[in-house]
Image (cartoon, rainbow, N blue to C red):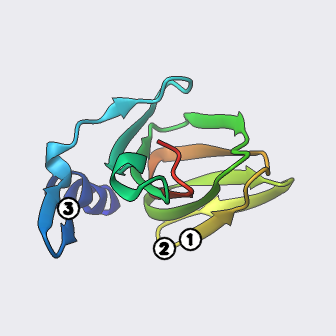
Amino acid sequence: MCKNLFDVFGLKGALLLPESRLSFGDIPWSKHPSFPGVELKHIVTSAQTGGQFSYHLVRIAPHRAIGNHTHQEQLETHEVIAGSGRCISGGGALDYQPGIIAILPKGVPHEVSAGPDGLYLFAKFIPALV
């Protein structure tokens, strides 16, 4: 059931603005350039926000991970939609399950790994990542 909720966002979800509507289904999945098994939909990009923020739908395949990395300039948030996993940030472990929101400060190394059902989340970056 949880994966179906993620599919609703990925296929039928939309960004609504007073002057426009952007269907998430019209945005292609992009493979992460460094981490196999990780895909992203770039919902809102730097070009749309003047660099203020970016917003991404992220899916991590079962038992795959976004390896240890640091964003020197961006605060990052994760909103877990479905699946399970773990984030290691600043030496602490954060268990991820639907309904969890995590805030990852800029300059702090972190990594995210998916459990047996994969991990599905929204990631926001302030200022924008892409």
Mark number displayed over residue 37: none
Location of the N terminus (image quadrant): bottom left
Q: Is residue 61 left or right of residue 97?
A: left
Residue 59 placed where, x, y %? 41, 44
User: What's the residue type where badge 3 is placed?
Assistant: Gly
Say which label, 2 or 3, has the lower sequence index: 3
User: What's the residue type where badge 2 is placed?
Assistant: Gly
Q: Report which quarter residue 77 is drawn in.
A: bottom right
Question: Which residue position holds label 1?
Answer: 101
Residue 34 placed where, x, y %? 56, 23
Question: Which residue position holds label 3?
Answer: 13
Mark 3 touches mark 1? (CB < 8 Å):
no
Residue 130 placed where, x, y %? 46, 41
Residue nearest the viewer, comparing 118 with 31: 31
Q: CA distance from mark 3 to mark 1?
A: 19 Å
The mark closer to the camera, 2 or 1, is 1
User: Image point 39% across, 58% down: which residue?
Assistant: 49
User: Image point 20% across, 71% down: which residue?
Assistant: 17
Looking at the picture, does residue 84 appear above or below residue 113? Answer: below
Q: Residue furthest right?
A: 91
Say which label, 3 or 1, has the lower sequence index: 3
Circle 3 packing at 10 Å, graded few (<14), some (14-19), many (20+), is some
User: What's the residue type where badge 1 is placed?
Assistant: Ile
Residue nearest the viewer, comparing 60 with 19: 19
Looking at the picture, does residue 69 appear above or below residue 72? Answer: above
User: Image point 56% across, 56% down: which residue?
Assistant: 127
Question: Which residue position holds label 2?
Answer: 99
Residue nearest the viewer, comparing 115 with 72: 72
Mark 2 touches mark 1? (CB < 8 Å):
yes
